[in-house]
Amino acid sequence: MPLFSLHKIHLKPTDYMARGRTRACYQHPHCPNKVIKVINVSRSSWQRLRWHWRTRLEIQALKKVAKYPDIAPYFPDFCGSVRTNLGRGFVFKKVHHAVDIYQSQRMISAHTFLTITAILRRLIRLRIPFHMDLTKNVFVDENTNDLYVVDSLGSNTFLPLTALPLPSFLYDYLMAGKIRKNIARLWVMKKRQVYVGGGTAS
């Protein structure tokens, strides 16, 4: 698929697969393995510009993540942009059989906990900005137990910090609060011994 398609795709506003505060996610009508994310039409012009900018930052971060094979599989690929009747759409690889590890009320295994922690540390080491709510956007494929993180990269809050040519030790110190908050949230979940997929939590 080209990075931007001139062909307009029609989406029914109420047929979204999921809808968040800023974007709605639709099944791509021509590609079963892809989804289209569109900025919510109910937002004001200023808010829509703001969230378009956030999406742009997310795409930039995803392109950087794609260069590192150790973490790239955890983030759905960005596949380009399309025109839709609801505005510009952003196409991503679809996560099949996805289970939200929060909303499902399942428990996180020790392996899942360690994996997410490793992802957070790797993002910080690579200076790839991410949102504070990253641990709320973790999904697991029910069939394969593969873990995915969605809608969590490219935080504009920390963009100036990540753009500065700081020594690694200083950057790690400044970002320490960010990773502590995410890991603390995971510890709460782990202590509840929530189970995800096969096997038992430890």
Image (cartoon, rainbow, N blue to C red):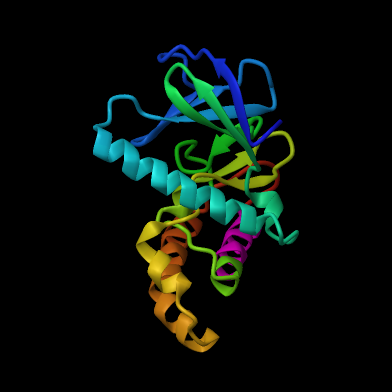
| Image location (x, y in percent) of residue 31 | 69, 21
Q: Quadrant of the N terminus?
A: top right
Stretch in magenta: 109-121
Q: In which quarter of the image is residue 35?
A: top right
Q: Where is residue 14 in the image (x, y as percent from the top left)?
A: 41, 14
Q: In which quarter of the image is residue 159?
A: bottom left
| Residue at the spot 52% in from the left edge and 23% down from the top edge | 83
Residue 145, given in percent of the width and then of the height, sits at 70, 43
- State the residue in front, 144 or 157: 157
Question: Overall secondary structure of the magenta stretch?
Answer: helix
Q: Can residue 108 be seen in this view?
A: no
Looking at this view, name the residue that lies furthest to the front.
Answer: 6
Q: Nearer the viewer, residue 147 or 47?
A: 47
The answer to which of 30 and 96 lies nearer the viewer is 30
Judge from the rendering whether residue 46 lies leftward or rightward of residue 149; answer left or right.
left
Q: In this view, does 63 lie above or below 172?
A: above
Say above or below: 47 vs 184.
Answer: above
Q: Is residue 173 left or right of residue 99?
A: left
* Whole-percent x, y for residue 63 in the image: 63, 53
**The C terminus appears in which quarter of the rendering?**
bottom right
Q: Can residue 55 be seen in this view?
A: yes
Instruction: Determine if the magenta segment contains residue 116.
Output: yes
Say whether residue 117 is magenta. yes
Q: Is residue 173 shown above or below 141? A: below
Q: In which quarter of the image is residue 178?
A: bottom left
140 shown above or below 94:
below
